[in-house]
Image: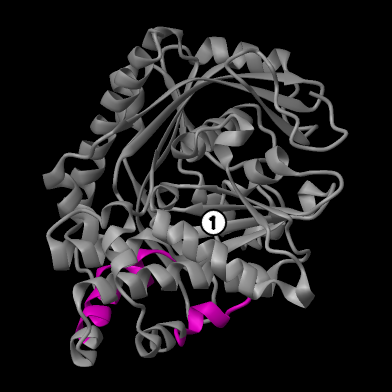
Amino acid sequence: MRVLGLMSGTSLDAIDVALVDIELRDRTLVVSLLGWTEEAWPSELRERIRGWSDAAAVVRVADIANASMEIGAHFAAAAQRGATAAGVSLQAVDLICSHGQTVHHQVDGHGRAVSTLQLGEPAVIAERTGRTVVADFRPRDIAAGGQGAPLVSFVDALLFVQEEQAVAALNLGGIANVTIVPSGAPFEAVAFDTGPANAPIDGCARRLLEQALDRDGALAAAGEPSEQLLAELLAEPYFERPPPKSTGRELFGDAFVARILARAAELGLGVEDVLASVTELSALAAARAIARWSPAWPEIVHVSGGGTRNPTLMRALERHLAEEAPGGRPAPRLQLVDDAGLPAAAKEAVSFAILGHEALFARPNSLPGATGAGHASVLGAIWPGDDHARLLQLVAEGRPGNERVDRIVMRRSNGEATAERKGGPT
């Protein structure tokens, strides 16, 4: 089945589009990446919705409704251009799976996720493209008692698990999330948001430099982290909360950046030192979370997300993982997910293509150990397109519901499949 995934993260840097072929072999999904693109957000729309996820934001219902329709139209256009870039007509795409744009994710004082909202009206995508759409993944998991995040852990666990060693998958988006997979046990994986990644770095760059980001972490590399500021930021209670847990720009968004800059001014910090401090915060929070909450110390950390393009952040992460390694254990090897045949920038769009594919076939596509839900669920709702009757026939001929997949394999462009599990089939 040919599936197109759409993803836009908390950093709002781009709409990621990935086109894949998915084939079920026994209980293994074999996934071939046909192409992927990044679609820039219109700057006016991006800035309009950027602050909506802050806890104190007050937004008119009409503005939210209008923006959801507008975002849906942009997702539809991105899907069309993504298919064209891959050399495929949109009519040859069987299914579109959209994560949407998160603008609200509320966690109460007890650490329970109580609501979530993703904009990007799926009906608009279905209408503009004529394709059946799977979207709205997070609410079902919250209804089952989970955090509604991180959902890509389902793909992380089944793709990266190895028989002889524990591994982890760390995504450095606006918010960082990690999946830790014990050896040979993908369904025992745990996952959670470690805290901020790019969100405060980019936020400080916008305020201090009037630029979208600290490119290559160059200014952070020229500065010195403030121990005083870091200690105060790390006192945030979220970092001490045990998994399952999730967070977002409600906690680590523009209001968080404003507090950082106000305190930095009181401490007399220069621009480079501020950026060095927030970069250090993201790396240290991730390393400490992995050390504290991992059921098994990972030997490899597969890294993805926009943060992989920041060498200063990656060096800090490597250093802190070495410092936090328990009992003299060696630091895990950082490995870009590209080495598994999956471009880092395409990973989440591919992941939601897989999640949507499984939802169509009514197979559970969540990990309760990752989100804290009471049971595995089928996440995602379906908006029929012109091809829906044909898809129903494919589902009827398949194996919906009664057997979950237990492995994902990425097939490289040369036709070879990756074997991420030692001793596992390719």
Residue at 51% x, 72% y is 285
Q: Is residue 395 left or right of residue 41?
A: right
Residue 264: x, y in percent? 24, 84
Magenta-colored stretch includes residue 226: no
Viewport quadrant of the C terminus: top right
Question: Mark 1 highlights which residue?
Answer: 149
Of residue 231 and residue 150, the one placed in the foreground of this image is: 231
Give the color scheme: rainbow, by chain, secondary structure or one colour: one colour
Residue found at x 46% / y 87%: 235
Residue 25 lies in quadrant = top right
How many C-alpha atoms fall within 10 Å of the one at disc 1: few (<14), some, or many (≥20)?
A: many
Relative to 23, 89 lies left or right: left
Task: Please give the range of residues in magenta.
Answer: 235-262
- Image quadrant occupied by the N terminus: top right
- Residue 419 position (above or below residue 172): above
Most prominent secondary structure in the magenta stretch? helix
Q: Is residue 153 above or below residue 248?
A: above
Could you tell me if residue 62 is visible in this image? no
Q: Looking at the picture, how far across and down is residue 92, in whole percent?
A: 45, 8
Q: Position of residue 336 (x, y in %)?
A: 56, 43
Quarter where residue 202 is shown: bottom left
